Amino acid sequence: MVTPANTVLFEEFCNTLECIFKKKQKRDREKILVEFICDLKTRIRQTEGEKNTTLYPVIRLLVPKLERERPPYNMKERKLGELLVKILPLRKDSQEAKKLLNDRSVLRDRDFASEVYFVVKKRMNERTGNLTIKDINDILDKIATAEVGNKGPILDQAFSSALRNLNADQLKWFIRIILKNLKLGLSDKGILACFHPDAPEYYDNCHDITQIHMKDGKFIYFTRRAHVVKIYGDNYEEGLLTRYLKGCFKSDVTSFILDGEMMLWHKQDQCFGPKGLPYDVKKITEKSAYRPCFCAYDLLYLNGKSLVGPAENGGTPLNKRLEQLDSLFTDIPGVIQHSKRKIVEKRTDILEELNTSMLNQEEGIVVKDVQSYYRPGHRNLGWFKLKMEYTKGAMPDLDLVIIGADRSGNKRQGQVKSFFVACLDNSQSEKRWLCVGCVASGLKSVDRDKVVTHLERHWHRTAFTPPQGNLIFNKARPDYWIAPEHSIVLEICASELTKTSTFATDYTLRFSRIIRTREDKPIDDTMTLEEFCRPTLNQGHVVKLATKRINQDQLANNEDKIPKKRVVKEKQVAEPYRVASHGDVKVTSNALAGRKLCILSDDEDCGRTELIKIVETHGGKVVADYGADTWCCVAGRSTARVRAAVTSRSVDVARAAWLRALLYYYIIKLKSLFVCLNA
């Protein structure tokens, strides 16, 4: 039986992706994808003889993040770069090799696949082999299923074949598929909707978090990301978990899907291990101190009948599902257990359970409406997760100093992805700052931009200038570092501390977020190393920071508020391209009369607004962008826009210092004073 979707040339597939990538409007991208799908369906209909009409071979390449059947590749940019350097081959100290090894000191484009494209373009032929979608899926299967001990030769063979049969453009998309990020400007559900309007909903109903699937004695375990975990065993005779399940289920049960969480159970202490332990429940072995234990809290499918969805679609409410779950199996401690639950009726009952979870060093509680229905992909349908860190005043605040930052690879995150924060070690004659971890979330984008603007004047690139001696990092080193005297203090909240060998302290922050900036606080008045380490004395691998019981007033303050209607702001020109007219400016000279100037950037001594006023004071006019009628451009800091103007040689570029000089001197021969900026 032939599968027409398998016969599509990978070259055609890549050309379609390239066309989608180049379009700026979402509707244009969707239109190209829909046309490709319609053309594919037409070819399937026109194929004669016995055939399989599935589009799955193409879909799994278009939405690699949603891939279920294929195991994870376990390959990121660094590993791919090392492999390509080996196969091409390249000298490791060459600029091209550094780009492939993701060396941030030489990377210009933060898209790794694009860097690969520019490196291999000159080394590969434009002519390509006739690889089909099936050929590409076969190569990806080999990469994903390669045994650990024999993975090296298989990867060498797979990528050597790809380099022989793909051109640079196709290799770029091949790399993006492996990295599971096509950068098409379309969401995964948006892509599925191009195949069929109901496809996203069907996907939600078939995909969920950690589950046990059983049918006729055969078991499958799925993780949150829909990856299959095979070490637990697929029948009652093997695996780290399934072989212990024999006899615990009712005899009349033929199939089911359980929803729950796989926990770590300490074999000797006979108790659950806390989250944050240096164990991966998907990779433990028979010799590990812990074993997997499944805690079931819902039943989604039983004996051929689905229990999910709303009532009109045949769904079952939570109280009925739990009745069936209770009778489905008998608990086996340390193997499979029903998660603990309790009926509550009053707010005080919820408060008591939340405080009890804090005393037991647990994460928190989940409150569910017993009449709620299980609807995959939907939120706020009667289920609420409560943690101590969600309650104001329940967690201690940590005042820490920014000593570094990591560059962002995502434009939405701005220039900085995360901040490295430190506590003060004043136990020695010379003060030191020990990095305790990274924090990324919590600040609004406006506040984050203010912090970055304040810091970027003083930070140093780690690749070019090593951090000064009083800044102590460890294995994790930032892209930028900053001296504490030029930095600011952040008030940070974290739910727990965990053991680490990555940062300068023995423990690091877990589930941390920024509360606010403390511009009023001097850096010498921040948290000391002694204060940071105090909660960890005589503690284990994970230390919970919540120590205060919360009261009813605090719980009431955290109730969900009615969401306000979002006010749609009027679209405006971005600040760097906005020209504000200052009507109160008095013209004092004609030095720039009748001339148009473009302010490309300001400097530390004079802001953009002040530069505009200077131009208007001397009779000139400021324009948003330079053109043929622009007399000159003015630049302070060297930015990408400034370098582009200098390189183009289409307009004169003068320093901002020259413009400021007009405040004090009336210059007659202006052109003789122009100084071009270095690119």
Image (cartoon, rainbow, N blue to C red):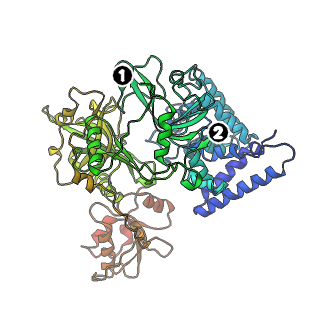
Residue 623: x %, y % from top left: 42, 74
Q: Is residue 43 among the parts visible in the rendering? A: yes
Q: Nearer the viewer, residue 457 or 598?
A: 457
Pick the residue in front: 235 or 280: 235
Of all residues, the one furthest to the top in this rendering is 287
What quarter of the picture does the C terminus occupy? bottom left
Q: Quadrant of residue 427?
A: top left
Task: Report the amino acid beneath label 2.
Answer: Arg
| Relative side of 486 to 336, left or right | left
Q: Relative to 144, does residue 17 appear above or below in the rendering?
A: below
Dot 2: what SS?
helix
Residue drawn at x 26%, y 62% as measured from the top left: 605
Residue lying furthest left in this view?
429
Circle 2 residue? 123
Between the C-alphas of marks 1 and 2, the distance is 59 Å
Q: In which quadrant of the rendered image does the N terminus lie?
A: top right
Q: Which residue is disc 1 drawn over?
A: 270
